[in-house]
Each structure stands twice: as C-alpha cells, then as structure tokens.
Image (tube, rainbow, N blue to C red):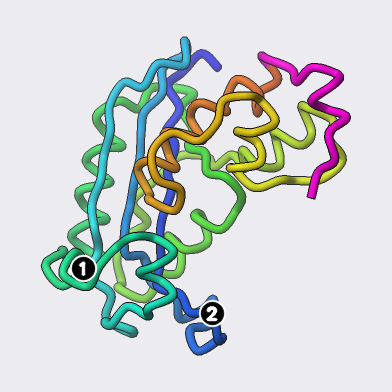
Amino acid sequence: MTAPVLVVDLEATCSEDGSITAEAMETIEIGAVWVGADGAVLDRFHSFVRPVVNPRLTDFCSTLTGINQADIDNAPPFSVAAELLREFVERHHAPGSSWASWGAYDRRQLERDSARHGTAEPIALPHQNAKRLFAKAQRIGKEVGMAKACELTGLGLEGTHHRALDDAVNVARLLPWAFGKRLLSERDRAKPVR
C-alpha cells in the first residue's frame, strides 16, 4: 500500500423478520477513514442518513446499531450525505488510491442508494474487498467477519461494533493483514474459523 486507502463502512435499515429485503435496505450511517501508507488514519468522516423507503427504524435495527430514530430523523437525505462523502474522498485521494470495505455489501449498498436517489456514486475509486483479501492473504480457508478478524489478529474491536465510523477504523486496522504485510501466527491460523 503506497497510496492512501479509503475505508468505508455503512449501516443500513434492517429487520430480523425479513420485512426489509436486501434491495429495500437504505443507508442510515456512513463512516469513512483515509489511511496512509504507514497505516495511520489521516482523516475521518461520519454522517447519519435519513431513509425514505423505511423511515422508521425497527427495534432490531436500533438495538443492533445503537442508532436511534432521532439520529436519522434529523439527518440529511442520501443525496446530501453522498455529496459530503464525495468531498471527503476528494480531500486525500492520490494516484493509485482505492477504497476498501469488509466484504462487498458496502459497495453494493452505495450502488443501490445512488440509483434509488438518482445521484452519482460518491466514490469513483477502485474497490477492494478487504474481507476476501484477508482470507486469501492469511490462508484461513474462508472469509470471516470483521470482529472475528480482529480476534484472530489479536487487535480486538475498538469502539462499538455496528457503528459505521468505529467499524471503518477497525477495518483500517486490519489492512496490514488484508494486504499481506502482516501474517497471522501459525497458532492463530489454526484457530477454528466459524
């Protein structure tokens, strides 16, 4: 990693009963960090987002994320939050920059929300699936969640899991392992992966 990397994590409307399908999910929180070649966080971005398809959060979603109804009722719509994110992206991108997320979900969610709101996608950089890169670089056989990856590396989670900015920071901390700059010990690699 020589150019800065943007790490993005999203939280979205959700339900435990299937009443909100993947296609109907809407971003409710965006967290992003620019990470320098040395792994240091250069800058942070956070915004809540007001959903329009399912404007009321389910109890499940609020409990999972810790995001309450007032947070999103007073938030900008996706088109405004996307423009703020676009400005943040422009602040540090350099030749060779890319963006990463833990899995492909965040990339797909940004595509869905951008299409739904008729706005350009806020990140015009190549995407890297840090979850896949981590599994491949560490030769653990299967992709694992971000919390499990933090456990395997001995980092532990910082902040609150399922909060966008905290999760983006945790993914940023995992980049040295995802990019193969650091390797799990044989003992950690041998731990059962569920």
- Foreground pick, 143 / 77: 143
- Sequence-first tag of 1 and 2: 2
* Element assignment for label 1: helix
Q: Is residue 176 magenta?
A: no
Question: Which residue range is magenta in the image?
Answer: 181-194
54 relative position to 4: left or right = left
Kindly report which numbered mark, 1 or 2, lies closer to the viewer in this rendering. Answer: 2
Q: In this picture, is 70 found above or below 41? A: below
The image shows residue 97 at horizontal and vertical percentages of 46, 27
Residue at x-position 38% and y-position 22%: 94
x and y percentages locating residue 42 in the rendered image? 31, 21
Using the image as rendered, state which of residue 162 and residue 87 is in the foreground: 162
Question: Against 57, is 7 above or below?
Answer: above
- Indicate left or right for 78 with 2 as reference: left
Q: Label 2: which residue?
A: 16
Real-space Cα separation, disc 1 to disc 2, in angstroms: 20 Å
Question: Which of the 4 quarters of the picture holds residue 49?
Answer: bottom left
Q: Residue furthest left?
A: 74
Q: What residue is rendered at 36% in x and 28% in y?
A: 34
* Disc 1 packing (10 Å; few <14; some 14–19; many ≥20): many
Amino acid beneath label 2: Glu
The residue furthest bottom is: 19
Most frequent secondary structure within the magenta stretch: loop
- Amino acid at pointer 1: Ile
- Which residue position holds label 1? 72
Q: Magenta stretch containing residue 182, yes or no?
A: yes
Specify few, some or many for label 2: CA neighbours under 10 Å numbering under 14, 14-19, or 20 or more.
Answer: few
Q: Are marks 1 and 2 in contact (CB under 8 Å)?
A: no
